[in-house]
Structures are given as structure tokens and as C-alpha cells.
């Protein structure tokens, strides 16, 4: 009786009763849950690209190529780092999110997505004549890394190829006594690493910039696929014996990372940084120790953004960036050449290795199978293969077309690439593919960790490559 | 007559439920309110833990649409503990000693937890002592002590990245010149471990300080007066009054911090060190599951081992807490 009286008094005075408390928390809880299910999606077809693509690609090109004006197209800037991008797509696809509809995927890790069936099979979704057209027109390497290794079906669309070049500041070289004759020679006939390291060191010494040669040697996927792979290749080394075994057979190919050529290339990298004379070649100290923690954005910042380095190894997109940079006098003071060579082709045993070598990179477009509107998504994807969109991709973000024919016809007249077309052609001819198989992502992880450990002196090159050899062999047998 | 005898009973089940609730005892009402929390806990904690354990009993399926393959029992646990699992980005532990200390996830995590919790406890004690005293400007000192704890972990990580990045960090050069760090402290496992540990201590000591302060302020001040009259030194007062009386609060604070430290991940990524350089247990799970490897069963195995280790740590603290509480009551 006493309780009832108390409760009545509390109700009258506005105090919190059990009834009111439960009602209030119940309503608040329901409202929160309802809010979580609110629709925050976009009706547009969303392409997850990168910052450059999001800022510089003209969407109008898609409509010029025949996409219906009723389809909205958005390009979002996904993670810049290739590893983070892969992780983001794993999460998106695992959660069966409908956006982004189209994903820009590094051809170094697309095959595992294909093998798992995480992205849409284009051969099942699009007409066979279009697929055949893409297959015939595009760079073989891009098609190969966009296809299911078991069935050969194409699951992703080639977007753009890429390969690195050696880029340098002509103004600093001129101050050190070099001339246009040297630049013209290097543009088609690159020097050896012995010569180039000495030259960069000399120019650096006479300049006021902080860094000599900057490149990407962080422990990340780009080291295993590209920057170390090409250095190793120019000394005649290979992960799996040679070019014939790049794409398999997995489990039935030799692991050759303990070969002398691979060890030598690690020592060359260490000599560039520490100048200890570990390599048999006479490599001059020319690179900062920071490169062992640097990837592309760091080197871009040092060479282009801050104009604080003599030379840089980087992909073709930085040529376009330098073109618009005052320090480079709108590209006039940018020198470009194929990568220096370690050993001449005649000096190495494996066919196709030695001489100037660059890593063949590239990007593909995969379709999210959980997209809200597959028909509209495929209409946008189809337009990517058109000349209009590829011209816009070249003019805006500065990415090369994925069709060799269009590289000649479009890039030759391009304001940024036109001057370097001969150099780019030589570099493209010397490109070596990364060994993309279903186990490559796991092997790549082991490679960049061990190689970076060897670079930084955490392990000797022999120890690191011994451990790597064991790990790669076990992964081959999975 | 029957309807007249129960005039107030409503046919509306909600109203009947509310009326029933109003007449519950205080204890029963408290349990009723805890039911939703237990249900949420069951959904977001125990169910995923069970699913994780179940996932860990299957082999990894790297190439098919399915994420896992055949049932393998505890084989994944054996492979992970004996360092036979090549899918892990770093070994959990290498009993052969072939892997450097700071590349083994379990050792890195335990070292991080022990060092950070010890330092945070000691520093937190000092900060709590400062905050407990009466002096002019105490309010501002309290704000200054608590401020690091209020900074989001991403911002904190960025601060340390900007301090130690070789290009822009103003600390990396001087520390390298006196031989403390190498040229790339954020990519060297030992240097990066020190940086992330210091970052964690800087941020979280304030949390310890607040809990210790709460314990200090609950002590009856007359005890100190009696001790002073009895001629007890400051150390004796601390040893025989302060420490025993705040021990339960201290153990709870250390328990919270140990749990957090055992699952460290955010500061490692945010500071730019990265999981490859400072491989904590959580790093190992995230990298193995969402990184290029995408080995779900292996990741689940490490995740469940992590949960067991944290469970053991909690048990140790709870036992210690029980003894300390018992001692206090006596």
C-alpha cells in the first residue's frame, strides 16, 4: 500500500517510474535500430578508383561512348595503397555491400578474387562478342591477369597498363655538367647501375636537394611485384627459375631465390643506401636510408611535390604530374629513361632477363556481384573499353590505354607522354610480368617481408633468402 | 460477478506486463533490466566467439568460393603454435628461436602489455597523487593530465607518425644522431615497438590515474591523521594505508588496461609502424583474414588463442581481486 502511494506521488510529481523508464528506453532503442537500417546508399553506378581518377576523369566521356544519360556515374577515391585497397574490397564483398558497383583492382591480386568467385564473371554476364573483342584488343598480360586460371574465362576488364621509368631532374644534371646529348642517349640507351649510381651521387653532391635516388623499398606488395622484382631480373635472378614459370605450374617449378643473382641484387640495393661494397659490382652510395620505408606516395612527395631529390623510379603517372609542375618547367626539365641495367642480357643465363627490365603493372575493373543494378553497371563497364573513355583516362588522370593500338594513336600526341614515346616504348618492351598465380598474394607477403629485412640488415641476404625459399616452397605445395 | 471481482485487470498484454513489472521486487527488477544487456552481450560477444572457434576447426580454403574447407579438428592450433602455418603474416611464436623476438606476435603482445601496464600504473599513480592534492591551478593540471586520453587514437597515431617519420619528423634525426633509433624508426621492429608503447603509455596513463584517484578519494582521511600521530613515515602511510585500500580499484584499472593492451591494434596502424613491423596478435588476425592472405581459419585460430590468453589474464586479475578484497575486509 505504501509502495502504491509512493508510485502515485512520483507519477504526479513527474519523477521517473519503472513504467516510464522502460517505455523511454524501449522507444529510444527502437528508434536507434530503425536509424541503423536507414537507406544511405546512392542510386548512381559507383566506380571505386583512386584520388587521381576521382578528381581528373571527365564523366562526360562515358555518355559520349553511349552510356544512357539516365545513368548517374560517380567515381570515388578508394585507398591509395594497393594493400589497403585489397583489404577494403575483401570487407566490402564479404559484407555483400552493393556499393561500389565497379572496383579498380591491382592485377597483382585480382586472381584470388576471381578464384574465390568474389567478383562477377563477365563471361556469364556479358555477350561473348564483346568479351572476344576485349580479349583481342587488350594487352595480353592484362587479359591473363583478369582471367580465371582454371577456366580461362574473363572475370575482369582491363583498365590500364603501367610500368616504371627512371625520372630525373635535368636542371640539376645540367648544373653538374651534363647536357642534352647525355639526356638523349639515356632516353633510349640507359646506363648500368654502376654508372647511374655514380652519376646520381655526383649530381647530388653538387646540388642543394636532400635526396639522391629515391625508390620504393618499403615492406609492401609493390616491393615483391615490382621494384625488387625488376632489380633482381636485371641481374638475371627470378623467384621461380625464369620467365617460363611466372604463371605456374604452381608446385612444379623451382624456387630460386637463393641464387647468386638474387643475393647480388639485394647487395646492390644495400650498397645504393649504405655504400658498404657488399655487391660484386662497384655501386656508389646514392639513395637515402628512408627508401626502405617508402612506397609511391613518399617518393612522389620527395621528387615531385618537394622537388627534393635528384632522381626517382616511378610509374608513368608521375610524368603527367611533373608536366604540370613549375619546378619542372611544365615538364621541360623532367628527364625520363628506361631503368638502368645490372648485367647485360648476354651475361645472364635465363632467357629474357638481364639488360634494362621494368616491372609490368596494371589495373583491372571488377564488378561487384551484389550491385543493385547489374544492367546499368555493365553498361558503364562496357564504355570503359571505348576509345572515348580511354582517351579521357589518358587526358585526365594520365593513365595509358589498355589497348596497344590506342597507346600508339593516343599517347603519341599526348602533351605529357608525347616527348617520351620512344622511351616508353623501350620500357614497355622490357617489361616483365609479376608471377601472378592463386598463391601469389601469400608468396608476395613473404617476399616483401624477407627482402625488406635483408635490405635493412635485420637478416643477412643469405639468411633472408634461405627463409624465403622455405616459405615459398611450402606455399607452392598448398 | 467474476468480472466485477477483477475490475482493474487489463486485457492489453503490454499493460498487464507493465503492471506486473511495477510489482517486482528491487532485485527482480534489476535482473529484468539486465536481460537486454545480457542478450546483446550474447549476440555480439559469445556468438561470434563460438563462431570463431568453429571456424578455427576447419582448414583454409584459399582458392574456392568457400572460405574454409574440411574439418581438421585442432590441427590449426598445432600448426600455429609450432610455427608450421605459412599463411600467417608473422609467426605467433617460434619455439625454435629462429625468428627475432619482435617478429613473434605473442611475444610482442605480451611485452607490450606488461611494459605499458607497468608504466601506466606507475605514472598513473603519480598523476593521481598530483590530482588529489589541493593547490592553486589544480583544475588546469587535471585538464593537462586527462587531455591525452581524450585525443582520438587516429590523431594520436598521426602525431607520433609526424614525430618519427624520417622526412618530416623532428625527433627522428636527433634520436638517430645519438644512436637511439635508426634512420627509419617506424619500419624497424624494435624502434617501432618502443614508439607505439610510448604512445600508448602517454595516452592511457590518464585512464589509470582517474581510477586510482577515485580509489584514493574514497579513503577515510582520519586514518592518515592517526598514522601521523603514531609517527608513521610517508612511505609507511603509503604502504599500510593507501596501497591496501586502493588495491581493489587498482586491480580493476590494471585489468581493464591489460585487456586493452592485449588486443592492441589501432595505435600500431595509426602511427605508421604497421602490423608487419609491430605484429601484435590483433594485427596477425586482421592481416591474415583481410590482407592478401585471406586465410579465414588460420585467422580464427589466432583470434581464439588471443581470446583464451585474455581470458587467462582476466582470471588472474579476478583471483587477485578476490584476495585483495578479502584482505581489505579483514
Image (tube, coloured by chain):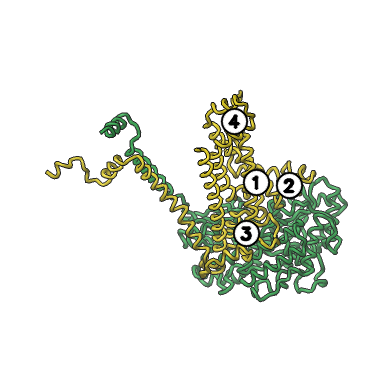
Chain colours: A green, B yellow
**Residue B92 — which label?**
3
**Residue A23 — which label?**
none
Q: Earlier in the sequence, mark 2 or mark 3?
A: 3
Circle 3 sits in a helix, a strand or a loop, which is it? Answer: loop
Q: Earlier in the sequence, mark 4 or mark 2?
A: 4
Q: Label 1 lies in what chain?
A: B
Circles 2 and 3 in contact, beta carbons < 8 Å = no
The residue sitting at 75% across, 51% down in the picture is: A290
Q: Between marks 4 and 2, how big is the CA–CA gap?
A: 37 Å
Percent of width and height locating residue A287: 79, 53
Is residue A402 visible from the viewing direction of this image? no
Circle 1 sits in a helix, a strand or a loop, which is it? Answer: helix
Is residue A145 visible from the viewing direction of this image? yes
Q: Between marks 2 and 3, how big is the CA–CA gap?
A: 30 Å
Percent of width and height locating residue B205: 61, 39
Q: Residues within 10 Å of mark 1 (few under 14, many from 20)?
A: some
Labels 2 and 1 share a subunit: yes
Percent of width and height locating residue A141: 65, 69
The residue where tag 1 is placed is B115
Q: Say above or below: A372 vs A175.
A: below
Q: Between marks 3 and 4, how big is the CA–CA gap?
A: 41 Å
**Residue B166 — which label?**
2
Circle 4 sits in a helix, a strand or a loop, which is it? Answer: helix
The residue sitting at 63% across, 64% down in the picture is: B82
The residue sitting at 64% across, 73% down in the picture is: A250
Q: Residues within 10 Å of mark 3 (few under 14, many from 20)?
A: many
Toward the viewer: A234 or A450? A450
**Residue B131 — which label?**
4
Q: Residue A187 lies in what quarter of the image?
A: bottom right
Q: Between marks 4 and 1, how big is the CA–CA gap?
A: 24 Å
Amino acid at each position: 500500500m505504501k509502495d502504491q502511494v509512493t508510485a502515485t506521488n512520483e507519477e504526479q510529481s513527474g519523477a521517473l517510474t519503472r513504467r516510464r523508464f522502460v517505455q523511454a528506453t524501449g522507444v529510444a532503442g527502437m528508434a536507434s535500430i530503425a536509424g541503423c537500417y536507414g537507406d544511405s546508399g546512392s542510386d548512381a553506378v559507383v566506380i571505386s578508383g583512386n584520388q587521381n581518377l576521382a578528381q581528373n576523369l571527365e564523366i562526360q566521356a562515358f555518355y559520349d561512348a553511349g552510356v544512357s544519360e539516365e545513368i548517374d556515374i560517380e567515381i570515388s577515391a578508394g585507398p591509395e595503397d594497393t594493400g589497403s585497397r585489397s583489404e577494403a574490397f575483401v570487407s566490402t564483398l564479404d559484407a555483400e555491400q552493393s556499393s561500389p558497383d565497379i572496383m579498380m583492382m591491382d592485377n597483382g591480386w585480382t586472381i584470388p578474387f576471381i578464384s574465390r568467385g568474389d567478383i562477377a564473371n563477365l563471361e556469364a554476364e556479358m555477350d561473348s562478342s564483346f568479351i572476344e573483342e576485349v580479349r583481342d584488343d587488350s594487352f595480353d598480360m592484362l587479359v591473363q591477369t583478369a582471367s580465371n586460371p582454371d577456366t580461362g574465362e574473363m572475370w575482369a576488364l582491363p583498365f590500364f597498363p603501367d610500368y616504371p621509368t627512371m625520372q630525373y631532374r635535368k636542371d640539376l644534371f645540367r648544373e653538374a655538367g651534363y647536357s642534352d646529348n647525355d639526356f638523349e642517349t639515356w632516353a633510349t640507351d640507359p646506363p648500368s647501375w654502376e654508372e647511374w649510381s655514380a652519376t646520381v651521387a655526383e649530381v647530388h653532391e653538387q646540388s642543394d636537394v636532400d635526396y639522391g635516388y629515391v625508390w620504393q623499398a618499403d615492406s609492401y606488395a609493390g616491393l615483391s611485384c615490382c621494384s625488387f622484382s625488376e632489380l633482381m631480373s636485371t641481374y638475371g635472378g627470378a623467384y621461380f627459375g625464369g620467365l617460363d614459370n611466372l604463371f605456374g605450374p604452381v608446385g612444379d617449378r623451382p624456387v630460386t631465390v637463393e641464387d647468386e643473382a638474387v643475393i647480388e641484387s639485394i647487395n646492390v640495393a644495400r650498397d645504393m643506401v649504405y655504400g658498404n661494397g657488399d655487391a660484386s659490382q662497384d655501386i656508389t652510395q646514392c639513395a637515402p636510408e628512408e627508401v626502405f620505408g617508402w612506397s609511391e606516395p613518399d617518393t612522389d612527395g620527395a621528387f615531385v611535390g618537394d622537388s627534393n631529390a635528384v632522381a626517382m623510379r616511378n610509374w608513368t603517372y608521375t610524368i603527367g604530374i611533373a608536366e604540370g609542375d613549375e619546378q619542372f618547367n611544365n615538364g621541360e626539365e623532367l628527364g625520363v629513361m628506361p631503368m638502368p641495367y645490372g648485367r647485360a642480357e648476354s651475361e645472364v643465363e635465363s632467357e629474357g632477363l638481364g639488360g634494362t627490365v621494368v616491372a609490368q603493372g596494371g589495373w583491372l575493373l571488377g564488378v561487384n556481384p551484389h550491385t543493385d543494378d547489374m544492367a546499368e553497371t555493365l553498361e558503364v563497364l562496357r564504355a570503359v573499353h571505348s576509345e572515348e573513355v580511354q582517351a579521357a583516362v589518358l587526358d585526365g588522370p594520365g593513365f595509358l590505354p589498355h589497348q596497344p593500338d590506342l597507346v600508339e594513336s593516343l599517347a603519341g600526341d599526348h602533351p605529357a607522354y608525347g616527348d617520351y614515346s620512344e622511351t616508353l616504348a623501350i620500357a614497355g618492351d622490357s617489361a616483365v610480368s609479376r608471377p601472378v598465380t592463386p598463391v601469389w598474394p601469400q608468396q608476395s607477403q613473404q617476399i616483401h617481408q624477407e627482402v625488406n629485412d635483408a635490405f635493412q640488415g635485420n637478416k643477412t641476404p643469405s639468411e633472408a633468402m634461405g627463409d624465403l625459399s622455405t616459405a615459398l616452397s611450402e606455399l607452392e605445395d598448398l | 460477478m467474476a468480472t466485477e471481482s477483477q475490475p482493474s485487470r487489463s486485457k492489453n498484454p503490454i499493460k498487464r506486463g507493465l503492471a506486473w513489472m511495477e510489482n517486482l521486487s528491487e532485485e527482480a527488477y534489476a535482473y529484468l533490466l539486465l536481460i537486454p544487456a545480457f542478450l546483446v552481450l550474447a549476440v555480439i560477444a559469445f556468438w561470434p566467439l563460438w563462431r570463431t572457434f568453429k571456424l578455427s576447426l576447419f582448414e583454409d580454403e584459399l582458392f574456392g568460393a568457400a572460405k574454409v574447407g574440411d574439418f581438421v579438428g585442432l590441427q590449426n592450433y598445432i600448426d600455429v603454435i609450432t610455427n608450421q602455418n605459412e599463411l600467417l603474416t608473422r609467426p605467433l611464436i617460434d619455439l625454435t628461436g629462429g625468428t627475432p623476438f619482435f617478429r613473434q606476435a605473442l611475444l610482442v603482445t605480451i611485452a607490450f602489455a606488461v611494459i605499458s601496464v607497468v608504466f601506466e600504473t606507475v605514472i598513473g599513480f603519480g598523476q593521481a597523487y598530483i590530482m588529489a592534492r589541493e593547490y592553486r591551478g589544480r583544475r588546469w593540471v587535471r585538464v593537462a593530465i586527462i587531455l591525452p586520453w581524450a585525443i582520438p587514437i587516429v590523431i594520436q597515431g598521426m602525431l607520433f607518425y609526424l614525430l618519427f617519420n624520417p622526412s618530416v619528423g623532428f625527433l627522428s634525426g636527433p634520436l638517430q644522431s645519438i644512436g637511439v633509433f635508426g634512420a627509419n624508426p617506424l619500419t624497424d621492429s624494435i624502434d617501432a615497438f618502443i614508439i607505439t608503447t610510448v604512445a600508448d603509455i602517454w595516452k592511457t596513463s590518464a585512464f589509470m590515474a582517474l581510477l586510482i584517484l577515485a580509489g584514493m578519494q574514497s579513503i577515510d582521511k582520519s586514518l592518515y591523521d592517526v598514522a601521523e600521530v603514531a609517527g608513521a613515515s610517508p612511505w609507511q602511510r603509503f604502504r599500510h594505508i593507501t596501497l591496501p585500500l586502493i588495491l581493489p580499484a587498482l586491480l580493476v584499472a590494471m585489468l581493464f588496461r591489460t585487456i586493452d593492451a592485449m588486443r592492441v591494434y589501432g595505435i600500431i596502424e595509426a602511427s605508421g609502424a604497421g602490423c608487419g613491423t609491430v605484429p601484435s596478435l590483433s594485427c596477425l588476425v586482421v592481416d591474415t583474414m583481410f590482407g592478401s592472405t585471406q586465410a579465414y581459419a588460420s585467422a580464427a585460430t589466432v583470434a581464439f588463442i588471443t581470446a583464451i590468453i585474455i581470458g587467462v589474464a582476466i582470471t588472474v586479475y579476478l583471483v587477485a581481486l578476490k584476495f585483495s578484497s578479502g584482505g581489505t575486509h579483514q
